[in-house]
Amino acid sequence: MILRPGRFVRLSLVLAGAAVACLDQRGVASAEAAERCWTPDAMAARTDEKAITKGVRTFDTPSKARTLQPFDAVSPDLRGAIRRVKLADGKKWIALTFDLCEMQGEIAGYDGAIFDYLRANGVKATLFAGGKWMRSHGERTQQIMADPLFEFGNHAEAHRNLRLLSGEALTNEIAGPQFAFEAARETLAGTQCLKDKPELAAHIPPRMSLFRFPFGACNAASLDAVNDAGLLAIQWDVSTGDPVPAQTAGAIAKSMIARAKPGSILIAHANGRGYHTAEAMPLAIPALRAKGFEFVTVSELLAAGTPEITATCYNTRPGDTDRYDTFFLPKKTSPKPAIETKPNERAPSAR
């Protein structure tokens, strides 16, 4: 990675605003790129892609290291966990985000029905993808990349708990998705469908600048590592609760509609672990639009206001993601109490 240690250049929201001002031009170019490379049928959902396949290690090997696009460490005023954005009075923007995580020894899903609905209704969203997910879903990654409605954020290499990592292991978990994204972008730019129009791929951002912690769990060391890698740490203030199988589409939609407010960042999943999420979107999005909300990407939201930052990461209250430090450890079993016996009395045999 190219890193300038000790240099804290403010990630200027003025520059972010300039990037947003170019979105219309980028959008037209990216839309043309998608249309040149894929038919509507090729981008449509397939039912066989949603399921998670366990016991597959084909994509466990990390992406090949490469020289990343230049970046600066996050400036002091933007370091920490961004939960939402304070907007000017009257602006009702919200950012819908979907996590695309994948752990070792599996291939996670791709919930194409979500993307079909977002595309059909012109809804922008930010996708936080793991490096492993991008490798195992190479074509879908490029389709999302070329679509002006969507932007990518980094969701760590293989969804490990960064609170438990340090040194090279921590660095690799952060760098892996950057390698995967920039490699996918390079591959897309070199495809036959774009070779005669390289300027179309040139409008796709050269690097990811956003990061979401696996499990929403971080500590001071992992936050610093993410910010030092030039990535803004993006949490959320509205959780759909969609990884819970019992959470119905109605309950997901109700949570979104009731809790969203101007500047909110909403979290859901599109990797096969968002139970009933696809069914919830047609319930929630029209209702939120009826309330005057406009869907934008996280980058657009950041450019439009002042991020609200906390010193740590959490779901709904500080400390509620600390449980993931021991969540995957083998559960301890309590030893059976000793059976007291009287002299010359035999203990009962196990049945």
Image (cartoon, rainbow, N blue to C red):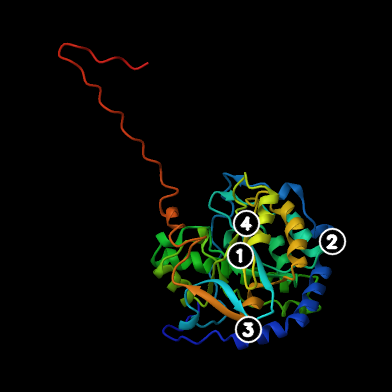
On the image, the x and y values in percent for residue 339 come to: 25, 22
Q: Amino acid at mark 1?
A: Phe
| Quarter occupied by the C terminus | top left
Residue 241 seen in this snapshot: yes
Which residue corresponds to mark 4? 240
Which residue corresponds to mark 3? 16
Residue at the (48%, 82%) spot, across then down: 77
Q: Nearer the viewer, mark 2 or mark 4?
A: 4
Quadrant of residue 255 within the rendered picture: bottom right
- Numbered disc 4: secondary structure: loop
Disc 4 crowd rating (10 Å Cα; few below 14, some 14-19, many 20+) is many
Measure the C-alpha gap from mark 1 to mark 3: 19 Å
* Farthest residue, direction left: 343
Q: Amino acid at mark 4?
A: Thr
Residue 199 seen in this snapshot: no
Viewer-side residue, 116 vs 142: 116
Q: Is residue 171 left or right of residue 283?
A: left
Q: Is residue 238 left or right of residue 198?
A: left
Measured along the vertical axis of the image, is residue 248 above or below residue 138?
Answer: above
Mark 2 / mark 1, whichever is N-terminal:
2
- Numbered disc 3: secondary structure: helix
Residue at the (43%, 68%) spot, across then down: 222
Q: Amino acid at mark 2?
A: Pro
Viewer-side residue, 135 vs 302: 302
Which residue corresponds to mark 1? 128
Quadrant of residue 192 within the rendered picture: bottom right
Q: Are marks 2 and 1 in contact (CB under 8 Å)?
A: no
